[in-house]
Amino acid sequence: MNNDQIELSKYRLQKAKEDLKNAEISLENNFFKGSINRSYYAIFHGIRAILALDLFDSKKHSGIIAFFQKNYVLTGKFEVLYSKIVKNAFVIRNKSDYDDFFIVGKSEAKEQFENAEIFLKKVEAYLKAVWVS
């Protein structure tokens, strides 16, 4: 792992944290669909922060998620809980963004935000350990 990979990883983690903050602001202001969208992208960019260290990227979200599942969840680096968080966030974000008349309530948006927080805490702890090793 070289310094460029670490810097890209740090950049992507910062992007994930900004998305999480935007999710929180949207939630506080009752923009539930926007909050769900930003919560998902916080998770997505958190995954991409990890994958920067593997020199892997994909134009498709499903490719990013599949690589994470195969190389981090199935290997035990991340518990199955995190796989469930990713899958759920992906599904609800797609419905929220693309399905006509999909109604999102505060409870769903709050749950997605809290899951994104949990996910990013794990990602950040994992990355900090890898960056110094």
Image (cartoon, rainbow, N blue to C red):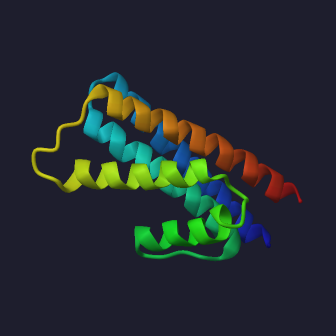
- In this orientation, does residue 74 appear? yes
- In this orientation, does residue 26 appear? no
Report the quarter where the C terminus lies.
bottom right
Report the quarter where the N terminus lies.
bottom right
Q: Is residue 19 left or right of residue 79?
A: left
Q: In this view, does 94 lie to the left or right of 63?
A: left
Q: Residue furthest left?
A: 101
Q: Please say if 13 is above or below 60.
A: above
Q: Quadrant of residue 59?
A: bottom left
Q: Which residue corresponds to the image point at 46% horizontal and 44% vertical from the top-left? A: 19
Q: Which residue lies furthest to the right in this view?
A: 133
Percent across and percent down for residue 120 are 60, 44
Q: Please say if 24 is above or below 130.
A: above
Q: Residue furthest top?
A: 28
Q: Which residue corresponds to the image point at 34% horizontal and 46% vertical from the top-left? A: 37
Q: In which quarter of the image is residue 78?
A: bottom right
Q: Which residue corresponds to the image point at 10% horizontal and 44% vertical from the top-left? A: 101
| Figure label count | 0
Percent across and percent down for residue 6 are 73, 63
Percent across and percent down for residue 63 are 47, 74
Q: Which residue corresponds to the image point at 55% horizontal and 43% vertical from the top-left? A: 17
Percent across and percent down for residue 11 are 61, 56
Q: In which quarter of the image is residue 60?
A: bottom left
